Image: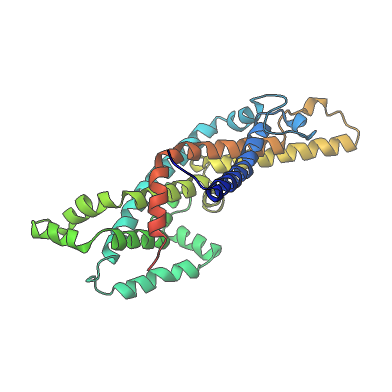
């Protein structure tokens, strides 16, 4: 029979209370947004909505997805997330593996060159001119090539390799006849799965949420991403609401302009649409995420 002191019981009670408060503070806003997304727009404008829809409707999601080009945008977004995440993991991991080797010549010089873009950015206009010169404007690869390498992620992986993989393991493999690629792919890579899972989550979330690349560098509708299309729908609904307000002020009949979805309800539906895929993926990576990011957080 285990014995718990009164002090430990008080600590557990306080700890439970604090954890419960944190859960409520973090979960309640999302449930509130979900209720707005599932509630009729004009009813939401009355206020007083909690975590349950008062006038249930799918209209907000229907407005966002009724555009036939949404499927093409969804395809571009998903393919971008998959291709960009996969290729950036290859590039970043191989760079981190090389940088983790003390015998790599000019390593400090290479690190100095790579760290400069972290603090000094050329700006939007020079970037636009550069993309124009190399043919990335209105090109699918504008979503992939510029984000293939991340210095921050490379440092995380390099630190993980140096702190978690003993050099004697590599030396032992080489004594058994393994080459450099065999050591990297069959010994180091499997041991780096926790930090690679964390980096996968970073890259996937970043690619999924990004819509400014489309805004700045893409005008071809066939290359629009889902997030950019959703932003356009919200802007159009805001314009419609403004027209209705102006018509009402001038005494015009607005009965033919009734629109059950409002900008607020559309924004809520957009938040739900863009976060659900990440929420579904996160549980599969969570067990690797904590371990990987805690070890990789110490940068040398």
Q: Quadrant of the C terminus?
A: bottom left
Seen in the picture, residue 250 relative to 290 is either above or below; the reply is above
Q: Position of residue 84 (x, y in %)?
A: 40, 48
| Quadrant in which residue 104 is drawn | bottom left
Q: Position of residue 214 (x, y in %)?
A: 53, 48
Residue 116 appears left or right of 6: left
Which residue lies at the image location 91% right of the left edge and 33% below the top edge? 251
Q: Is residue 199 visible?
A: no
Question: Farthest right residue?
Answer: 251
Type of colouring: rainbow
Residue 187 appears left or right of 265: left
Q: Quadrant of the N terminus?
A: top left
Q: Nearer the viewer, residue 26 or 240?
A: 26
Q: Position of residue 115 (x, y in %)?
A: 41, 69
Q: Position of residue 285 (x, y in %)?
A: 40, 43
Q: Is residue 281 visible?
A: yes
State the count of labels.
Answer: 0
């Amino acid at each position: 029979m285990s014995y718990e002191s009164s002090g430990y019981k008080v600590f557990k009670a306080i700890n439970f209370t604090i954890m419960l408060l944190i859960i409520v503070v973090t979960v309640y806003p999302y449930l509130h947004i979900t209720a707005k997304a599932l509630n009729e727009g004009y009813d939401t404008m009355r206020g007083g909505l909690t975590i349950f829809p008062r006038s249930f409707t799918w209209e907000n999601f229907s407005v966002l997805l009724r555009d036939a080009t949404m499927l093409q945008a969804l395809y571009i977004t998903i393919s971008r997330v998959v291709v960009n995440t996969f290729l950036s993991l290859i590039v970043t991991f191989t760079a981190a593996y090389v940088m983790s080797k003390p015998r790599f010549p000019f390593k400090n010089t290479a690190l100095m060159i790579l760290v400069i873009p972290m603090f000094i950015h050329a700006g939007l206009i020079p970037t636009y001119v550069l993309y124009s010169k190399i043919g990335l404007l209105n090109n699918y690869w504008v979503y992939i090539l510029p984000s293939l390498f991340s210095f921050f992620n490379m440092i995380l992986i390099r630190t993980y390799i140096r702190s978690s993989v003993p050099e004697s393991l590599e030396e032992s493999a080489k004594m058994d006849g393994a080459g450099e690629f065999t050591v990297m792919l069959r010994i180091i890579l499997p041991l780096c799965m926790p930090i690679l899972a964390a980096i996968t989550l970073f890259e996937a979330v970043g690619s999924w949420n990004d819509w400014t690349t489309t805004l700045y560098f893409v005008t071809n509708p066939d290359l629009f991403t889902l997030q950019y299309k959703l932003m356009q729908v919200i802007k159009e609904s805001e314009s419609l609401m403004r027209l209705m307000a102006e018509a009402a002020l001038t005494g015009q009949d607005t009965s033919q302009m009734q629109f059950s979805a409002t900008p607020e309800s559309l924004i809520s539906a957009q938040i739900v649409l863009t976060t659900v895929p990440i929420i579904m993926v996160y549980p599969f990576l969570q067990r690797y995420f904590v371990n990987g990011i805690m070890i990789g957080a110490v940068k040398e």
